[in-house]
Amino acid sequence: MKPRIFIGSSVEGLNIAYAIQQNLTHDAEITVWDQGVFQLSKTTIESLIEILEESDFGIFVFSEDDIAEIRNTTETVVRDNVLFEFGLFIGKLTRDRVFFIIPSNSELHLPTDLLGITPGKYDKDREDGRMQAATGPVSNEIRQLVKKLGKRNEQEELAKTPLKKSPVDKNEENWIDDFFSRKYKEAIKKLEESYKNEKEAERKLENEIWRAYCLFKIDEKEGGGEARRDTLQELC
């Protein structure tokens, strides 16, 4: 069986996601986020967890989607939900199996924790506009890594409790909605409430990491985020 790859992006990055899908179609079973992943009657997090359980690799297209005021400087940033999904996949699949792609010569502001990690790149300014050709080199780099690592082995799967069988409590669903809406203070309150009710050590640590990240996002706009960043790095 071919490895399974999930590609995440914003709506604006879909043309790049489709181009990568075309390039890798002979090497893997590939699903772009808008191709039946988010189902009716299921919450966003439930759908994400389901596709995460099925995937061997994740590719995320980081595009210049939003403008943010960070420490009195205007920056182009990746959409929060794409970063959230990227982090979710790294937590499950590990960093070796999750890749992010950015435009060449981009002024995109990346989270500090991603600095030093080599992204894949493509030429978004090709004169002929052929994005399948523009993403050819990075697609080939990913192809080689997919062939090298292959599917997640069965022992790895048996060693981990499937996330989709774990109950998702109401606080968890709600803090994610608040996070996507950039209501970070509300998200922190719900994370703290969820932390009190959580018994598994691994889930408690995950909760602490997201709480620290929400605090970092607040401080990023107000200044003085270094202390929060240090806390987040210690937890990770």
Image: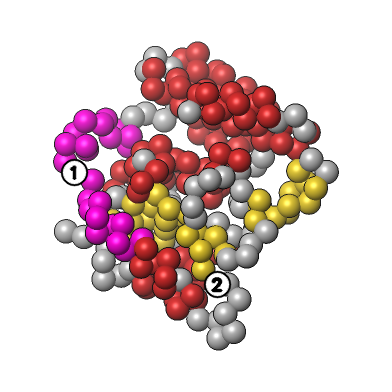
Residue that mark 1 sits on: 153
Kindly state the secondary structure of the residue where label 1 is placed: loop
Q: Nearer the viewer, residue 41 or 46?
A: 46
Label 2 packing within 10 angstroms: few (<14), some (14-19), many (20+): some
- Find out whether residue 200 is within the magenta segment: no
Question: In the image, what residue occupies the spot 24% across and 55% down?
Answer: 148
Residue that mark 2 sits on: 123
Which amino acid type is marked by label 1? Asn
List x then y, in percent, for residue 190. Answer: 58, 24
15 on left or right of 224? left
**In the rendered image, which quarter is residue 217 located in?**
top right
Which mark, residue 69? none
Residue 166 in view of the camera: yes
CA gap between label 1 and label 2 equals: 35 Å
The magenta-colored residue range is: 142-165
105 on left or right of 143? right
Looking at the rendering, in which quadrant would you find the N terminus? Answer: bottom left
Chief SS of the magenta region? helix
